[in-house]
Structures are given as C-alpha cells and as structure tokens.
Image (spheres, rainbow, N blue to C red):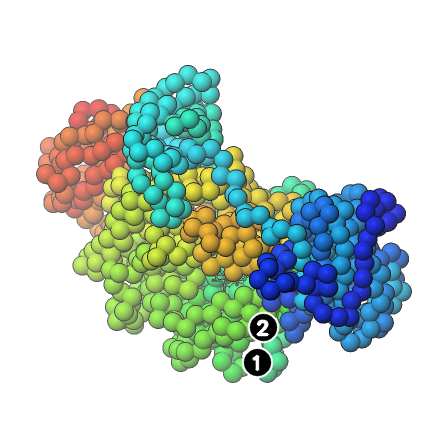
Amino acid sequence: MRRPRGRPNTTLLVPLLVPLVVTALTVPAFGGLAPVAGAQEPAEQVSNGDFAAGLQPWWHTETAPAEVVDGRLCADVTGGTVNPWDAIIAQNGITLADGEAYELSFTASASVPTTISTNVQLSAEPYTTALSERVALGTDMTELRYSFTSNLATDAAQVAFQVGGSAEPWTFCLDDVSLRGGEAPPPYEPDTGPRVRVNQVGYLPSGPKHATVVSDAAEPFAWRLADAGGTVVAEGTSRPQGTDPTSNQPTHHIDFSGFREEGTGYTLTADGATSHPFDIRQDVYSALRTDALAFFYHQRSGAEIEAEYVGDEYARPAGHLQVAPNRGDIEVPCQPGVCDYTLDVRGGWYDAGDHGKYVVNGGISAAQVMSTYERALHADGGDPAELADGSLAIPERGNGVPDVLDEARWQVEFLLRMQVPAGHQQAGMAHHKVHDQNWTGLPLLPHEDPELRELHPVSTAATLNLAAVGAQCARLFDEYDPGFAARCLGAAETAWDAAKANPDRYADPNDGTGGGAYSDNDVTDEFYWAAAELYLTTGSDEYWAEVAASRHHDTEVFTDSGFGWASVAALGMLNLATVPSELPADRLTFVRDAVVQGAQRYAATATAEAYGVPYAPSGYEYVWGSNSQVLNNMVVLATAYDLTGRAEFADAVLTGWDYLLGRNALNQSYVTGYGEHDARNQHHRFWANQVDASLPNPPAGSLAGGPNTGIQDPVAAEHLAGCAPAMCYIDDIGSWATNEVTINWNAPLAWMASFTDDLAAGQQSPEESTCSVSYRVRDEWTGGFVAEVTVTNTGIEPLRGWTASWQYAGDQRVTSAWNARVTQAGTAVTAENVAWNATVAPGGSARFGLQGTWQGSNPRPEAFTVNGTDCA
Ligand code: 9MR
C-alpha cells in the first residue's frame, strides 16, 4: 500500500558541485563555526533534535520502527536488508543555503558495531547530497560532528540516518541531533488569502450573512456582492471595527443578510479584495451531516474498513485484533502492578491520530453521537428520518436500527468492555484507557502497530463516563434491543455505585507515554452528568437528589471556554432541559433558563467578536482543540434555539459555522473537503499523505483541532512562536497540538451539522411561504394534553403582531394557554400574540403553550395560517 520512501541518495545520483569539507571532529563545539562572543550563534535547522517532544517531526521506515526511550530515539532495525537506504530515520523540511557553512552533530550507538550513512540531502529525487558520510558506530553513545559547505539551496532537504544493509537485526540509538548554520528559518507567514473573509462553503438563504475584511481603512468602504457571472446583485457599506484582539488584525464588518437568492459562486468584493467564492443555498449542511458522522466508521478499531463503504482510498484491514504484528486488543494485560487479569477490549473508535482508546473522551464522543439522534427525536424541527436506518454507509445499514445509533453502539460496546468484571478488586470501575506501551511514529496503519497494548489504572472519571453513557444508551436502545439496553443500564448503575465508593481515583497526569494522559482532578462534573443521565433514564429520586445537591446544578455551568471531555456538567444540564422526563415544571424551568442564559452569553460573544465566533475564553487563551469548544458553545446556542425558537440563537450558531468554515483570521476552513482553503494535513497515522504520498489525506468531514495558544508540539513551536490566539494553527501533520483530529471533536461537529441541516430544512424559501407553524403534543394523558406551538417567520419582513389559526380534527377543547391569547369556536382555534412576542424578526419564532381536553383521539392539526396566509 505504501510507496518506499526516502529512497537514497547518494553520490551515484548527482556529482557534487562543491567538494565536501567533511571533518569528523572529536574536539570543541562548532569547529569552524564556533561562535564568537557577542556574535550571533549559527541558526538551528533541526526541530526536536533531543527528542524531548517525542518522535515528531522525525519519521522512520517500517524497517526501522523507532520510539523514544529514556529521552533518545531508538530503532530496532530489521536484518536482511541490502542497501543503507532500506532503513531510514530522518527529518524533512530542512532549509539549506548554497555556499553556507553548516555543522551536523549528534550522538549515536549501535547494539552491535555497524557502519551507517549519515546524509544531509534533498528529500525527493534527485536526492542530491550536501553531506554524505559513512559512520562507524560502536555500542557506546558517541558524539560525532561533521562540517560542510552546502551545495544546495532548498527548503526541502532532510537529515537522514540510513541504517539499512545489515544481515542481522540491531538497535540504533540517536540523540542530540543538531544542524547549525545558515539563516534562522524564515518566520512562518501563513497564506491567509484574500482579505475579505467569508464562510467558504455557503450561507443559508434565510440566515444571517456576515463577512469580515482585514483593512486598516479608517472610514467605511463600499462592498459589492456579485453572482457567478459577475453581475452585482447587492451593495452596501462596511463598518470599521478596530483591531481584533484574537488576531491583531484591523477589521471591517460586512452584513449582507438582506440578500437571499439561492445560487453558487457568489463573491464579495471590498477595499480592493475579493473573497473566495461561496454559495447561498438551503442544503449547505446536508452532506456535512453524513460526512461528519462517517468519520466514526473510519476510526473503528477491530473492524475492517471496507471499500464498499469508504472507497478504495480509505479501505484498510482491521486493527488490533491480535493479528501479528498487533499485540492487542483481545487479551490485554494491565501495566505492571496494576491488575492481574487481562481484558478483551476490542472494538471502539481510535481516539485520534494515535491508536489509543480512552474512556473519558470516548464517553463524551459516544454521548454526543447518541445526542445527535436524541435531539432529532425530541426537538421541534428535529428530523430523525435524516439519521434513520440507511442514512449512513456502514455495514449495519438495513438492520432496522437508526445508523447513528449503530455507530454509537460500536463505541458503547467497547466502553462496556473497559469495566472491571465482577469478582476482581475494583469491580464496576472502568479502566481509564488502553494504548500502546510506547509512542509510535507516522505513518503507521492500525494493523501494523507492533506495540504492546496495556490497560491503565481505573479512574473515577472513566467510571462516571461509563455510567452516563450507559444510562443514555439504555433509554435510546430500549426500542431496538431491550437486552442491550438492559446491559447498558446494569453497567451504568454498577459504575455509579463503584464511583461513589471510589470517588477520588484520579488518572495520573504523568501517564503520557504511548498515549495521552487525559487526567482530570475534578470529577464533580462527571458525577453531575452521570446522575443527570441516570435520572433521565430511571426517574429515580436517588439520582435527582445527586443532581440537585451538585454545585454544578447552577446557571453558571455554561462557562466562557465551554464544555469538553474534562468538563461535562453541561451535558447533564442540556439533556435535563430537553429529554422528556418526569421533571416537575419548576425544575424544568430552572434548567431551561440556565441553558437560555448560557446561550445569551454566547450569542453576545458572537456579536462582539470580529469574526462572529461564539467563543471568547478568558485572556483569549484558545485551548488545544479550540474548534470543539466553539462547537460545544454552538450546541448550547442550538439547544436554546430548540427551546425558545429565538432567532438570535440560530444566528449565533450560523456565525459560529462561518468561523469554522473560513471567516476567520487565517481564512482557513477547519473541515476537510469543505471550503476553498480547507485543513488537509491533520495529524493521523493512516491519513498521512503529507509524509507518504501513497496514503490519503483525511476524509471529507474531518475537523482539525484548531488554534491553540499552547503550541505544544515542535512544528507549532517552531513556526508559530508569538502567534496571536486565533492564528496559532498550522495545517501540518507534525502539529498534533493544533491540527489533530479526534472523536470528541468530530462528535459535536456531527451534532451541529445535523441541527443546522434540520434548521435549514425548516426555513422555507421566502418565495414559497412566509410562515411555518409547528404543533407538538408535549404531554398527553387520558382526556388531557399539553401542546407547544411555534410560529416561525420564514419571510423577509418582520411580523408585527400575529394570529395563528388551525382546525382540530378531533374533539379537542383548549382550556388554558400561555404566551398567547387563544380562543376556540367549534373546531376552529385562533391564537393571538401577547405584547412581548408580537414582533418576530425574519427567521425568528414565537412560541406558546396550551392545555386542553380530548375524547376519542387527539390528532395533531395539519394546516395553519398566520395572519390569514397559509403556512408551510
Ligand atoms: O484533546 C486533548 C486536550 O484537551 C489535552 O489538552 C491534550 C494534552 O493532554 O491532549 C488532547 O488529547 C490528545 C490525547 O492526549 C492523545 N490523542 C490525541 C488527542 C488530541 O490531540
């Protein structure tokens, strides 16, 4: 599947133009390049030469699987290869200047004395060398230094240790690699494209349409919207907004919401710049809904990823089914001293670009995938048919179960396997994670991973994730597989009891070799989330008491930075507010108000931010995976929209999308396959096209982590030092801190795309209709019912006062109403606004409720008018 890479060198290929000055030095640092006091030290061209940051950006061939052990790189070189270049450890992307003096230095050893080739050369054909040395290594780590003058001017050289050609296997170890000389690498200049920043995918016809222009013009300037043929279809004037603190860019704002005509290839021109093209259409989010969900099938562990569902490019054998060289995941031992049993923990989704499987972020991911369905089931305007059986390309399609639930089940089954079985110490607790004993390099397909897999200690956080997810699983699967639902609930209740008995088992923050630590020393939010889910599923007072007593049962749960794997109380609150339950009205009002208040803050943020993003963490410290925080804030906004129908919440969701899809400081769409300038080189061991052209880029619908002011990886550290918060991102496979993918980031992406596609479907084109009315029976009992009615303005003018009318087909009688004045004559009902909801902006809604009686049957009315006009 993979093309042999880093094919050699050497003098065979190109005669050297400049004679090499090669000296093996045993003496002082820098030889001829020794720094003079006060003079500038020669620039370092190698990143992470001491392996302090792990393997990246070093790579190795399959014949030299390398890992970082005791702070140095060691590779078990296979025997039986012929040429030096049959086994390589290298770093690409090295810049060399013609005629400049350089010194390469490193320490290295061989488990049996061996001669290797050390080259500084072009990393692709014709592989011209600037330095090529045969180096005899002994068993002790020895320091070596070579000076040379470059005959190359390139930014695509590599430092390569060619360690092949030995009949017998041996181990090569390497440390402190340095290549000094030349200029410091030029500061990274991101290609930010045109200064007019738009949602590169498109806008909904009835939605808000905003753009941001980078310009220091003091005065407003004219903008023009042109269609694909270049005809100007709308015009207006910008609004200067000053300097944006997230990017340090001076910006102007453009609002072209008034334009609603569907079309493709629109462009916006202002201040001498023209935006990337974009569409205006109703179905902007339709494909993204399925693409974002398809990500999870791609990430499945323990299953062959079949071409029938993903195409040839993305097909791969099953990983981690204990087929050599895999050593897991069927009888996985614990780390030494942690337990005395093995567990079968096959299946689930790989976390990210690595092959670890972690219960804490695995739990929130399964929950948000299940919630994608649960929201569609219960929300006004939610359309579960879009997620039904047959909606996704997965092997379970056609089994009668909604595909999104089938996909979630793949992960839930794995989470259940992570629970300590009865009869063992700590029974009922969940292991925090399972992953490789050592970090592996890139690329590496899952089925080729040779590392030992280990279970790590149990943790309270993991156990509560299992409790929450198990409870949610139980209520959603009851209809399709009661046996599985019962198993989920049993595991959830056992987990809850175990967590109560072991409330402070925290994962070790230093347990980060071979996999992420995912440590979290505050599990009060996990207790809250689990109690909320168990309450919603069982209705038990015991769990409600836990919810009510928690400090997270508070209107402040929706913080500026948003929720995520380590901060999950919001998940409990959102579901309490939306999943039908026995919650008494006052408690329901409390949680719904909390959601709405949180959403109001996020909506205000979106309005204030230069790029419309509903995310403003304290000090603008964009976190690792900031794009998922943006999405989770959008989830709160969307839930508030579902509850209230208020247009301001839907608008902030849509400007959040604009940010993610290109209207941002970098002019970058963070979703692969969406937009003119999309993320394509996310950190991943299989979708590793950037380091191996025979491998694919990430599939469409993969979300990059996004700007991260921490820039913790060497590529980000090298290129982004000093970056403004929203610009701390680089689309490079080596930047795992800004550009990885994970299941817990794609889960809110899928949730949001599903919501937004439903939202779009509910908004009729203005030509077709100017109103829609949804009538939902929220509660029904013998002889009585409560209904909730939402009147939506799908026209382009505000509604100033409204009267909605319908006919009952059965014998219903309205006995009381709230938020509207309702009268009934025979079967005809009219509902008139009250003062505070009289005005409904385009795209906005007003909602009211009523209680009534019925006899015989209680069918929903089908046709509605608003102010005498027929509605959709
Ligand atoms: O998403 C995680 C982020 O919140 C943490 O700050 C970071 C450092 O601990 O780890 C992130 O998760 C990574 C995990 O540790 C290993 N697999 C890839 C994950 C995404 O980068």
Q: Where does the image place residue 505, in percent across and percent down from the top left? A: 44, 78
Could you tell me if the residues under marks 2 and 1 are in contact, i.e. CB atoms within 8 Å?
Answer: yes
Alpha carbon of mark 2 to alpha carbon of mark 1: how far? Answer: 8 Å
Q: Where does the image place residue 52, in percent across and percent down from the top left? A: 60, 67
- The C terminus lies in quadrant: top left
**Is 712 placed left or right of 489 in the picture?**
right
**Is 762 placed left or right of 698 in the picture?**
left
**Is 277 placed left or right of 82 in the picture?**
left
Q: Which residue is drawn at 42% across and 64% down?
A: 566
Q: Residue at x 29, y 43 (%)?
A: 607
Q: Where does the image place residue 154, in percent across and percent down from the top left? A: 69, 44
Residue farthest along the front direction in this orientation: 37
- Element type where label 2 sits in the image: strand
Residue 652 sits in which quadrant?
top left
Return the disc, 2 or 1, that comes first in the chain's sequence: 1
Q: Which mark is residue 338?
A: 1
Q: Residues within 10 Å of mark 1 (few under 14, many from 20)?
A: few
Q: Which mark is residue 380?
A: none
- Element type where label 1 sits in the image: loop
Say which of 199 and 798 sits in front: 199
Query: Which residue type does callout 2 highlight?
Result: Leu
Q: Residues within 10 Å of mark 2 (few under 14, many from 20)?
A: many
Q: Is residue 259 visible?
A: no
Query: Which residue type does callout 1 highlight?
Result: Val
In this picture, is 277 found above or below 335? Answer: above
**Residue placed under numbered mark 2 in the picture:** 455
Mark 2 sits near ligand 1, with its Cβ under 8 Å away: no
**Is 297 placed left or right of 138 in the picture?**
left
